[in-house]
Image: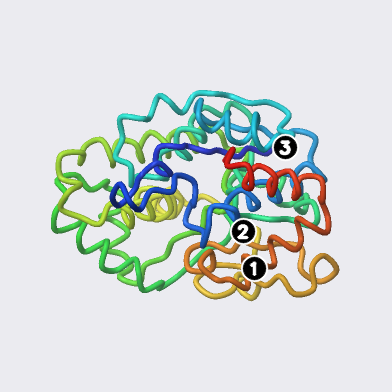
Amino acid sequence: MKIVQSFWSKPSLKFKDINDFDRFNGGWLDKRYNFMSWTLSCLQLNTFYDRVELVTDEEGEELLIQKLKLPYSSVKITLEKVNHYHNDLWAIGKLHTYSIQDEPFMHIDGDVFIWEKFDEKINNAPLIVQNLDADLPFYYPILNEVEENLNYIPKVVKEQRLKNRIVKSCNAGVFGGNDISFLKEYCKKAFEFVDKNADNLSNINVGYFNCIYEQYLFYCMTDYYNKDVTSVLSEAEKGVEGVKIDFNGIPSKVTYAHPANYAKKSQTICNHIEHRLMMDYPEHYFHIIDLLNTHKI
């Protein structure tokens, strides 16, 4: 199965004001950890898979390929096509990437790290997510905002809300599968969800809306159409709020980590990533340090 990663640079270019401008933090405590995360994620994927493709835009290609010199097997520069979308719609780049796949694939976020190949049951699954979630608190206020302020709500979302007031969703740190026709239909519906509400996005928290049109919509569609979804992580493995952040025991006991959301602001987690990159890939680590010291990134 092909592995895909995507980097849409536009959300990374947002800044609060002219004195608080740092283009590539990517949610991390500091931009150095963003660069190290992408590097470690890509290198670990290349350890276990022959085909690791990057979908990005021109600025992403300059950063990840020309400067960081990451060894992707192929690069598609196509995300300029979604630059008309709002800066905070960061999942749009991922959706576009999903939509252009014509063969079985797994999209892996740039903050996901593996230390073994995924099980064959994952590789052969029709639909794949990192894990399923239920009753995560942050979904409720944004769903209320969506229902109160947006003009268009997909039928499957309305049906799910009537069926189950406890919000069930998925974590798309790993996403894809073999059912390409369903995945393309899902992407079509997700873009429709965003496009039909473009004039009203100022009335909601746009950043949190990403979780609705990407992760919650996917769950709603799979439930509505009775589709089987395979999770990379079991309920016991997924960690707090679906974020697998335990770096202790790598690589003998821990073979998967995904320090998303708040974990990116943890100095301990950032130190773990830097240490692993320095120990396992010193050439890449010191290359990043040199680029930072000479202000080339």
Residue at the front extreme, as displayed: 294
Q: Which mark is residue 154?
A: none
Instruction: Identify which residue, 258 or 273, lies in the foreground.
Output: 273
- Residue 120 position, x and y percent, is 78, 49
Q: How is the image coloured?
A: rainbow
Residue for point 52% across, 27% down = 100
Residue for point 73% across, 52% down = 121
- Residue 179 position, x and y percent, is 58, 38
Q: Secondary structure at mark 1?
A: loop
Q: Which residue is mark 1?
A: 234
Vertical order, 252 against 281 (above or below) = below
Q: Which residue is mark 3?
A: 1
Q: Which mark is residue 231?
A: 2
Under mark 1, the amino acid is Ser
- Residue 161 position, x and y percent, is 28, 62
Under mark 3, the amino acid is Met
Residue for point 76% across, 68% down = 254
Residue for point 36% across, 41% down = 190
Q: CA distance from mark 3 to mark 1?
A: 21 Å
State if disc 1 and disc 2 touch (CB < 8 Å): yes
State if disc 1 and disc 3 touch (CB < 8 Å): no
Q: CA distance from mark 2 to mark 3?
A: 16 Å
Neighbour class for label 3 at 10 Å: few (<14), some, many (≥20)?
Answer: some
Instruction: Identify which residue, 15 or 238, lies in the foreground.
Output: 15
Q: CA distance from mark 2 to mark 1?
A: 7 Å
Neighbour class for label 2 at 10 Å: few (<14), some, many (≥20)?
Answer: many
Number of dots carrying numbers: 3
Locate residue 192 relative to residue 11 in the image: left or right. left
Tell me where residue 236 sits by quadrant: bottom right
